[in-house]
Amino acid sequence: MLNETITEFLSDEGYDVVSLYDGIEAQNKLYESRYDLLLLDVNTPGIDGFKLLQESREGGVETPAIYITSMNSVEHLERGFECGCDDYLRKPFAFRELKIRIETLLKRDFYHKNREQIIISEMISYDIENHELIIEGKPIALGQKESTLLKLFMKHPNEVIAHERIFEYLWNYDEEPSDVALRTYIKNIRKLIGKEKIVSLKKQGYKFVAQK
């Protein structure tokens, strides 16, 4: 019942929700698709929520996660964070609180990175902590929009990002998005990291090609 209620609430708030009841099924989904956020209970059939998240983190899944559980001891809280969760919400809870916690997590820039820099190419990297582009060991100053756009690409490597999503991320509600300006920002970033690192897909969006 709680699963259905949360799904309905988040759907009404405009989120696309994938609802599952089994830990094994959830584990399979995590390796098949990319998600923005995970909401996990602990007492789930197949694989419990603790083991599910721990194994997913070990497998390279960095998606932010919130545990929603009736387990309220300090030991359970500690185990939840040791398994790799980003937040821990005890039942019962207000849906408004859940919404606030979700929105707070989605505003973060990076999750569960075990390195301080993302390697773009042999001589270029991105400093996660300071949000700086490093070329041949030297930090490079970027314009505000270019920096914000590069940060978006770093958060979603090898993923096609639709034009509409970039517009929403790059421009505030009181600003007018511009396709011409976006192409200029892309051009400026390409000059620094290489044209081949940002691929334009007609009528779809852009993709940052990360080094594997």
Image (spheres, rainbow, N blue to C red):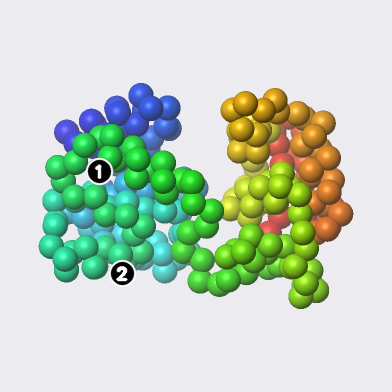
- 3 or 172, nearer to the observer: 172
- Picture coordinates of residue 77, whole percent (x, y): 21, 63
- Checking the image for residue 21, the label placed there is 1
**Residue 47 seen in the figure:** no
Q: Which quadrant: the N terminus?
A: top left
- Give the distance between the C-alpha atoms of the residues marked 2 and 1, in whole angstroms: 23 Å
Q: From the viewer's perspective, tell me whether residue 21 is left or right of residue 161.
A: left
**Residue 15 seen in the figure:** yes
Residue at the (41%, 64%) spot, across then down: 57
| Residue type at numbered disc 1 | Tyr
Q: Residues within 10 Å of mark 1 (few under 14, many from 20)?
A: few
- Picture coordinates of residue 209, whole percent (x, y): 71, 55
**Residue topped by disc 2:** 82
Secondary structure found at label 2: helix
Q: Tell which circle, 2 or 1, labels the residue nearer the N-terminal end.
A: 1
Q: Are marks 2 and 1 in contact (CB under 8 Å)?
A: no
Res. 10 image quadrant: top left
